[in-house]
Image (cartoon, rainbow, N blue to C red):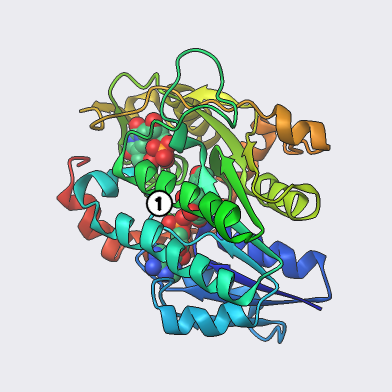
Amino acid sequence: MVKYLITGGAGFIGSNYVRNLLKNNQDVTVVNLDKLTYAGNLDNLKDLEGDNRYKFIKGDIGDAALVDGLVRDADIVINFAAESHVDRSIGRPDDFITTDVFGTFVLLEAARKHGVKKFVQISTDEVYGSTEGASFVETDPLMPSSPYSASKAGADRLAYSYFVTYDVPVIITRCSNNYGPFQYPEKLIPLFVTNAMDDKQLPIYGDGLNVRDWIHVVDHNDAVDFLIENGADGEVYNIGGGNERTNLEITSIILEKLGKPESLKKFVEDRMGHDRRYSVNCHKINMLGWQPQYEFKQAMRETIQWYEDNRWWWERIKSGEYLEYYRSHYKE
Ligand code: NAD
Ligand code: TYD
């Protein structure tokens, strides 16, 4: 029996991870530690109710006493918990420092004390900053440009330091932009899909030509499992989907699938410090034998279909706290 402690498992990527871990493995137990911030949602894991291999604990990764007890009982810790939205980090960076940096420190301290078998720090390709030239390799300097990516870079290097200094078996992943079911509808794809479904405008920042590399969330999580098995401690691994698209291209895919008019596009003021392009070179993980499986066009259509089929999930979010936030910003 392998005992997992998953942090942030009520969020987008973490909840997809927990579901697939329990589906694909019989001999595992999962403790999901999540603070249930605005982005944490137990609806994401409704289907796991009654599975006695799974336990949810509401709490903060910065709570040292709580974390100590949970890490003591874990074999593998995967830290998905974070404040994750760039726009929010521009408005109010505080929670990003507290959770992404200090929270990761608290987890690492407990891992050092109790000697876990593996500690995976879910970092991001955004720590490299923007590139209009070559794709980033793992040894490139980190030049994060938003409070979000800077806090993630801090956590990323802190995790590395716990490997070098204390021999904690840390693996650091730097993945590109994820898409798939259960993504909070403040991020580009679920925001635009759900707005378009309701004939609301799609706020395109700047000229819409910023580029992101899109990967299906299940491919990302599959890479995490692959690296737990095959990665080397202390190493960083880029994970990308190989699907670089401008935001305008993403917008057109969404409008076409939903049969909605181009007139829903609305060019708005650019995001402050908006990174032009993220791009990672994935040679390192490819050489170990991992490749993404999802075909972008098809998986995007299925993702859009998921939001069409699961109005109950996102309507509840959009009608509540999120709407307050959304209204108080410049998008409407
Ligand atoms: P998300 O915002 O959907 O989920 C984050 C989860 O963390 C939520 O459930 C939230 O309640 C929880 N959380 C926040 N603060 C917490 C705290 N102090 N203690 C415990 N739980 C807390 O984010 P996501 O998109 O699922 O991202 C998950 C991780 O993957 C993050 O670390 C993010 O930086 C990283 N990442 C995301 C992407 C992407 O495209 N979404 C790409 C690369 C890396
Ligand atoms: P986002 O989903 O916030 O991810 P990240 O900024 O972490 O890559 O945004 C993806 C891209 O879409 C980014 O270039 C900003 C842009 N964007 C918009 O144009 N309009 C929006 O309303 C949002 C949320 C994002």
Q: Is residue 245 above or below residue 313?
A: above
- Residue 184, percent from left and from top: 43, 55
- Residue 41, percent from left and from top: 46, 69
Of residues 177 and 312, the one nearer the viewer is 177
User: Which residue is disc 1 drawn over?
Assistant: 84
Quadrant location of the N terminus? Answer: bottom right
- Residue 263, percent from left and from top: 33, 25
For the point 31% across and 18% down, the residue is: 207
Q: Residues within 10 Å of mark 1 (few under 14, many from 20)?
A: some
Give the image quarter of residue 297.
Answer: top right
Give the image quarter of residue 103.
Answer: bottom left
**Is disc 1 placed on a helix, strand or loop?**
loop
Q: Is residue 12 left or right of residue 120?
A: left
For the point 58% across and 61% down, the residue is: 166
Of residues 150 and 160, the one nearer the viewer is 160
- Residue 286, percent from left and from top: 77, 32
For the point 15% across and 51% down, the residue is: 328
Amino acid type, mark 1: Ser
Note whether ligand 1 is within 8 Å of mark 1: yes
Q: Is residue 42 above or below residue 241?
A: below
Q: Is residue 153 left or right of residue 115?
A: left
For the point 19% across and 42% down, the residue is: 332
Q: Is residue 237 above or below residue 163?
A: above
Q: Is residue 179 left or right of residue 141?
A: right
Q: Is residue 323 above or below residue 127?
A: below
**One can see residue 311 in this view:** yes
Of residues 197 and 287, the one nearer the viewer is 287
**One can see residue 308 in this view:** no
Of residues 147 and 242, the one nearer the viewer is 147
Most extreme residue toward the front, as rendered? Answer: 165
Q: Is residue 212 left or right of residue 54?
A: left
